Image (tube, rainbow, N blue to C red):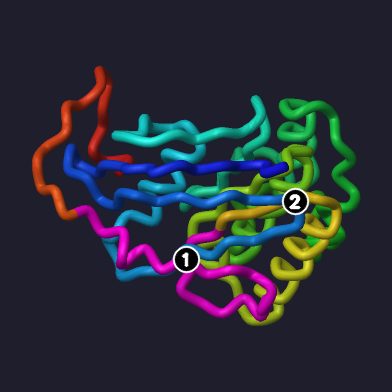
Amino acid sequence: MSLLAVRDLAVARGGLRAVEGVSFGLDPGRALVLRGPNGIGKTTLLRTLAGLQPAVAGRIETAPEAIAYAGHSDGLKPALSVTENLRFWAEIFGGHDIAAALEAMNLRELASRPAHALSAGQKRRLGLARLMVTGRPVWLLDEPTVSLDRDSVALFAAMLRAHLGRGGAAVIATHIDLGMPEAEIIDLAPYRATQTRRESRPAGFNEAFG
C-alpha cells in the first residue's frame, strides 16, 4: 500500500501553473528524487504535497499526519541548544528518542551548543536530524544538502537509507548525486505546464512562498 499517492496533480506558483499531470505512488522503502531546471516548480510541488498550499488539480492521498517537510529553513530556535531543539520537536511530534538523531548526524559533541552558535553546515545537520524525531513515515526534502560538506552528505544519505529500511519513504528535490542508485528519479521537465492562465488565488495566498 502506498504511503503517498499522487494522481494527475497540477500546482501553481504566483497564480500560474508550474507543473501538471504529475502522478506517482510512493511505497514503503522507496525514495523519489525530483529533478529539473531551476524555477520549474520542485519547491512548489513539495509544498503542495506537504499541505502548505492547495493543488490546482488532481489528488493527493496519504494518511493523516504521515508527512514531515524540511524546506530551505532549518526550523531551529536560536537560543536553544542542539539537544533542546531536538527535544522540543520530539515533544511536538510525540516524544521520540533524540539519541539516535544526535548520533545519525554527528551532533553529540555539539549537543550543548546553542543553535545560534552553529555554523551553516551544523545548523543544516540539526535541521535534518529533526526529521528522525517526528516519527513520520514520509519525508519531503527540499535541497536538503545545502551547506553540507561531502562527509555530511554521506551522513544524510545513511540516515535516509536507515529511514527507508524502517519502512519509511522520501521525496527529495536535489541537484546532487546522493550516492543512492536505488532512488527513482522523476524529471519534471516533461510536466511543465503548457497553460499560462492565471489561477484564482485562495484567501491569504502569499507569492513569497511559491
Disc 2, SS: loop
Location of residue 54 in the rendering, given as x and y in whole percent from the top left corner = 36, 30
Question: Which of the two labelled residues, at mark 2 and mark 1, occupies the earlier sequence position?
Answer: 2
Picture quadrant where residue 200 is located: top left
- On whether residue 182 falls in the magenta region, the answer is yes
Location of residue 179 in the rendering, given as x and y in whole percent from the top left corner = 66, 80
Relative placement, left or right, of 118 versus 43 is right
Relative placement, left or right, of 11 versus 178 is left
Residue drawn at point x = 56 percent, y = 33 percent: 61
Residue drawn at point x = 56 percent, y = 54 percent: 141
Q: Is residue 78 visible?
A: no
Q: For mark 2, does the 10 Å Cα neighbourhood hold few (<14), some (14 to 19), or many (20 or more) residues? A: many
Picture quadrant where residue 68 is located: top right
**Label 1 belongs to which residue?**
186
- On whether residue 7 falls in the magenta region, the answer is no
Identify which amino acid the numbered label 1 is placed on: Ile
Give the position of the C terminus as an image quadrant.
Answer: top left
Distance between mark 2 and mark 1 Cα atoms: 18 Å
**Label 2 belongs to which residue?**
28
Location of residue 195 in the rendering, given as x and y in whole percent from the top left corner = 14, 48
Q: Is residue 168 visible?
A: yes
Residue drawn at point x = 80 percent, y = 44 percent: 83
The residue lying toward the viewer, choosing from 54 and 5, is 5
Above or below, 82 relative to 94: below
Q: Which residues are magenta?
A: 172-193
